[in-house]
């Protein structure tokens, strides 16, 4: 099989920095070449010098792996900028309140721009370089108002980075029964238009969203994700080992363990081969 016959995709693990267990799982998969990207939460609870150094070591063993910023604007995390508002108990607003406020245009795009700029600067300080790409925790980067400040910050402070759009490319008839993904598609359409006007590159396709409340067989989901992304497209995932810190911060726990187990398995390697997909640049 020649390289020309392979479809190259980004398989990106979100949330590096949320907990030591998640960090360790992501590093293991990068070293095993089962991931080729991870996005880092610089406001996470597990993003000290040792965790940064260990991630750099893992990436050094896999030159196809890219490091990005996981811009974070929702609870239970805290802003880097002193005057960021609105907050609740000194934390960002919960996801539902952030989305509602964005849809009702209640936020200040300049305040958001300053916070994203501060997170880009923190990433550069930690890793000694700008992020290769910038995405958003819980897809906040595509929300109304947020997307304007987000794109301005990336354009100014990480001009060579590409950004994540979270929309799929299937016909509407194939998307209508998945409300969450349909919302991401709708918001991403406007995000792509704004990114194009701003001269900021973005991924041509996206997959990886599913109902985290249901226990589903991740291998079957991954086959569907691979069907949905073109060459150069992106699949997000959330693998990791569950630890006490993760349990205290995020309800998405057992699913991370299941994703990790599948991505580390030979079944996943066979799936990539069967679909002529490679995790290379």
Image: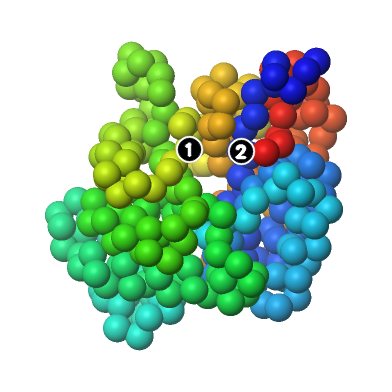
Q: Which numbered disc covers residue 152? A: none
Q: Residue 154 placed where, x, y %?
A: 40, 59
Comes first in the chain, label 1 or label 2: 2
Q: In this picture, is 171 found above or below 208? A: above
For the question of whether residue 220 can be seen, the reply is: no
**Residue occupying image coordinates x 30% and y 67%:** 112
| Residue at 64%, 70% in the rendered image | 127
Asked if 92 appears above or below 64 in the picture, the reply is below
Most extreme residue toward the bottom, as rendered?
Answer: 82
x 71%, y 36%: residue: 280
Element carrying mark 1: loop
Using the image as rendered, state which of residue 163 and residue 269 is in the foreground.
163
Query: On the rendered structure, is 117 left or right of 122?
Result: left
| Above or below: residue 132 compared with residue 48 | above
Give yes or no for contact between labels 1 and 2 (Cβ–Cβ under 8 Å): yes
In the rendered image, residue 177, in percent from the top left (x then y), is placed at 36, 22
> How many numbered discs, if any?
2
User: Where does label 1 land, which residue?
Assistant: 203
Crowd class of label 1 (few under 14; some 14 to 19; many from 20; radius 10 Å)? many
Residue 8 locus on image (x, y percent): 65, 29
Q: Residues within 10 Å of mark 2 (few under 14, many from 20)?
A: many
Q: Percent from the top left, x then y, of residue 129?
A: 60, 67
Say what secondary structure mark 2 lies in: strand
Q: Is residue 213 visible in this depiction of the protein? A: yes
Q: Quadrant of residue 272?
A: top right
Residue drawn where x is 53% and y is 75% of the image? 122
Q: Quadrant of residue 234?
A: top right
Which part of the image, by quadrant, shows the C terminus?
A: top right
Q: What mark, if any, has residue 10 been given in the picture? A: 2
Q: CA distance from mark 1 to mark 2?
A: 9 Å
Q: Quadrant of the N terminus?
A: top right
């Amino acid at each position: 099989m020649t390289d020309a016959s392979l479809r190259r995709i980004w398989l990106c693990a979100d949330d590096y920095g949320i907990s030591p267990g998640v960090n360790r799982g992501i590093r293991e998969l990068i070293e095993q070449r089962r991931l080729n990207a991870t996005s880092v939460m610089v406001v996470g609870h597990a993003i000290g010098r040792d965790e940064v150094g260990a991630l750099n070591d893992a990436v050094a063993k896999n030159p196809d792996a890219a490091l990005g910023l996981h811009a974070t604007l929702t609870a239970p995390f805290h802003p880097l900028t002193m005057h960021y508002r609105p907050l609740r108990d000194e934390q960002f607003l919960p996801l539902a309140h952030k989305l509602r406020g964005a849809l009702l245009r209640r936020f200040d795009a300049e305040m958001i721009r300053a916070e994203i700029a501060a997170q880009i600067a923190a990433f550069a300080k930690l890793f000694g370089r700008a992020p290769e790409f910038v995405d958003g925790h819980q897809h906040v980067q595509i929300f109304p108002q947020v997307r304007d400040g987000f794109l301005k910050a990336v354009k100014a402070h990480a001009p060579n980075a590409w950004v994540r759009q979270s929309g799929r490319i299937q016909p509407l008839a194939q998307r209508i029964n998945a409300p969450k993904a349909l919302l991401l598609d709708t918001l991403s359409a406007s995000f792509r238009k704004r990114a194009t006007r701003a001269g900021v590159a973005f991924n041509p396709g996206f997959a990886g969203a599913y109902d985290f409340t249901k226990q589903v067989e991740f291998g079957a989901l991954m086959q569907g994700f691979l069907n949905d992304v073109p060459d150069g497209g992106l699949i997000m995932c959330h693998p990791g080992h569950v630890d006490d810190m993760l349990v205290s911060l995020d309800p998405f726990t057992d699913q991370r363990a299941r994703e990790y187990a599948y991505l580390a398995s030979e079944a996943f390697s066979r799936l990539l081969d069967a679909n002529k997909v490679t995790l290379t640049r």
